[in-house]
Amino acid sequence: MRLQRLELQEKRLDNLFEKVSTFEENEIKSHLAKYLCIQTSGYLENVIKELIAEYHDGTCKKNTEYFVNQKLRHFTNVDNKKLEYLLNSFNVKWFDMYFDKISDRQHQSLNSIVSQRHLISHGRESMSNISFLNMVQYYDDLKEIVKVLRLVIQKSN
């Protein structure tokens, strides 16, 4: 059930990217790219929280499950460093698998999403240089990162 929500969120984002691509005015696309940046960052946060919850569901004591969920509740602004630290905290093998499968460009895209989201959400959007074309690339890279996370964070690992 949890993972179905993620698929629905990704589908909504896909549809939103498709709709924004139909606009011809670059200024509108630029403003919408900022919105897409925030939504994309939130999507990754949800992916991580749901995959971890799915991983520990039914495999640990309720107190441990509660602790993990509380810690993840405040897991935001997920850049590469934070993500790698989290994966390594759970399982060194997860970190190794993730690190081996993610390209430098995907690392950079993830960090760009978070740094741009930070500027936008803290009222410094005039300092943001995000464009719709950048966001398309970042989102494509993020979807690849999500695929890797789905492979890495499994009960069998």
Image (cartoon, helix red, strand yellow):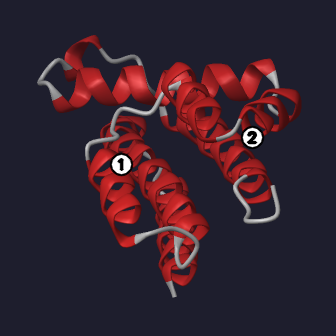
Vertical placement of residue 122 versus 60, above or below = above
Depicted 63 relative to depicted 149: above or below: below
Q: Which residue type carries mark 2?
A: Trp
The one of 25 and 134 positioned closer to us in this rendering: 134
Please identify the quarter of the rendering in which residue 74 is found.
top left
Please tell me in which quadrant of the rendered image residue 97 appears: top right
What's the residue at 40%, 48% (across, down)? 36
Mark 1: secondary structure: helix
Is residue 26 rendered to the left or right of residue 151? Answer: left
Q: CA distance from mark 1 to mark 2?
A: 17 Å
The mark that comes first in sequence, 1 or 2, is 1
Asked if one can make out residue 22 in the rendered structure from this viewpoint, the answer is no
Indicate the position of residue 10 as horizontal and vertical percent values: 55, 67
80 vs 157, left or right, is left
Q: Amino acid at mark 1?
A: Leu
Q: Secondary structure at mark 2?
A: helix
Q: Which mark is residue 136?
A: none
Name the disc covering residue 94, or none: 2
Identified at 60% across, 66% down, the residue is: 55
Instruction: Give percent across and percent down for residue 71.
Output: 31, 45
Identify the disc placed on residue 72. Answer: 1
Q: Are marks 1 and 2 in contact (CB under 8 Å)?
A: no
